[in-house]
Image (spheres, grey):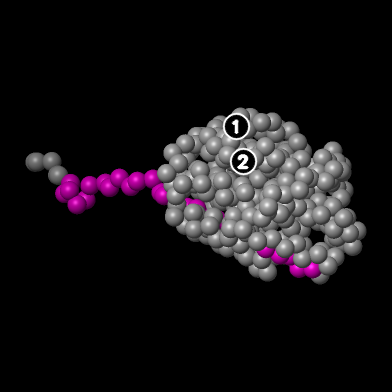
Amino acid sequence: MASKVTPASKAPVKTSAAKANALSLHIGLNAVDPAAYGGWDGPLAACEFDAKDMAALAKSQGMKPTVLLTKKGTRAATLAAMRSAAKSLKAGDLFLMTYSGHGGQVGDVNGDEPDHKDETLCLYDGQLIDDELYFELSKFAAGVRVLVLSDSCHSGTVTRDFPPPPPPAGQRPRLMPAEVARRVYETHKKFYDDLQRKVLAEAAKTVVDPDAALALVGGASQATALVGKFKPSVVLISGCQDNQTSMDGEHNGAFTGQLLKIWNSGAFSGNYSSFHSRIRAGMPPSQSPNLFLLGDQAALASFMKQKPFTV
């Protein structure tokens, strides 16, 4: 008897690997709510432009962007968007977060900051503490690639103790004034202290100490073997060093404007390391973009070799 031949239509079909998903969140605040900041409204000019331009870049790369501008850039909306992304993305997927606005500081309750201050993002109705930010990032699944771009000031002891030099004409610093930061913290001390204690309590359950992780991160070429159970691969590029000031402009912040110039509508062909180096090389000495890496060393090495914004 002749052997039975399987018709071509019945032959097994090989399926290609599932395409990675990508979500992005873009926050741009040209002002904050004076009621949450002791009467200070923090006027800026280019932050909404930054958010819109970065959202357009993300969309052109196949990401699904969420944009939060000024009054919509609240703590609740920001945390909700991050948590939604963390729940939906899996290994191999990408999350891009961009922030453009003021940076601030609140008192450090757990003693993990050398200057006794925790850095913050000044959202519309209140600050997002760095402890909160990194704890939320730690909730992403293993294998998720996370890129955070922050065009703001996170000033350390130098700019707090000594006023920065006068900004160039047409520019203003993206830094909440120290006297405003002190007044806001004193007025809302219990709120911000309780936020930090809550994060510490949650982090203790998963052996994640975000600030300790950052303190142990070396230069751009080093991975973070001491982060513990930090599962995703996170690349964070900030607009300046902790002792510098990120500048605002008329259409884009200095950092975002240089990033878009180097990206050149996708003509840039290097990897994340060269992208950071090219951006930094085009900035004035007073503003040198920083680079942090968080996560598994091997996964980060692979991530860093990719062309920026690759889904």
Name which residue lies at 33% across and 47% down. 15
Q: Residue at x 75, y 52 (%)?
A: 175
Q: Amino acid at mark 1?
A: Gln
Identify whether 23 is placed above or below 299. Answer: below
Q: Residue at x 76, y 48 (%)?
A: 166
**Circle 1 sits on which residue?**
297
First along the sequence among labels 1 and 2:
2
Mark in the foreground, 1 or 2: 2
Q: Dominant secondary structure of the magenta stretch? A: loop
**Residue 285 can be seen in this image:** yes
Instruction: Give the mark count.
Output: 2
At label 1, counting other C-alpha atoms closer than 10 Å, the crowd grade (few under 14, some 14-19, many 20 or more) is: some
- Mark 2 crowdedness (10 Å alpha carbons): few <14, some 14-19, many ≥20: some
- Quick one: which residue is furthest to the front in this view? 169
| Badge 1 element | helix
| Magenta residue span | 6-34
Q: Quadrant of the image for the N terminus?
A: top left
Q: Residue 189's x, y, as percent?
A: 89, 58
Indicate yes or no whether the magenta region holds residue 22. yes
- What residue sits right under mark 2 in the picture? 283
The tag on residue 281 is none
Between residue 250 and residue 197, name the one nearer to us. 250
When asked about the image quadrant of residue 114, the answer is: top right
Between residue 98 and residue 180, name the one nearer to us.
180
Q: Percent from the top left, x then y, of residue 67? A: 58, 63
Inter-mark Cα distance, 1 to 2: 29 Å
Q: Is residue 5 covered in magenta?
A: no
Q: Position of residue 16 (x, y in %)?
A: 35, 46
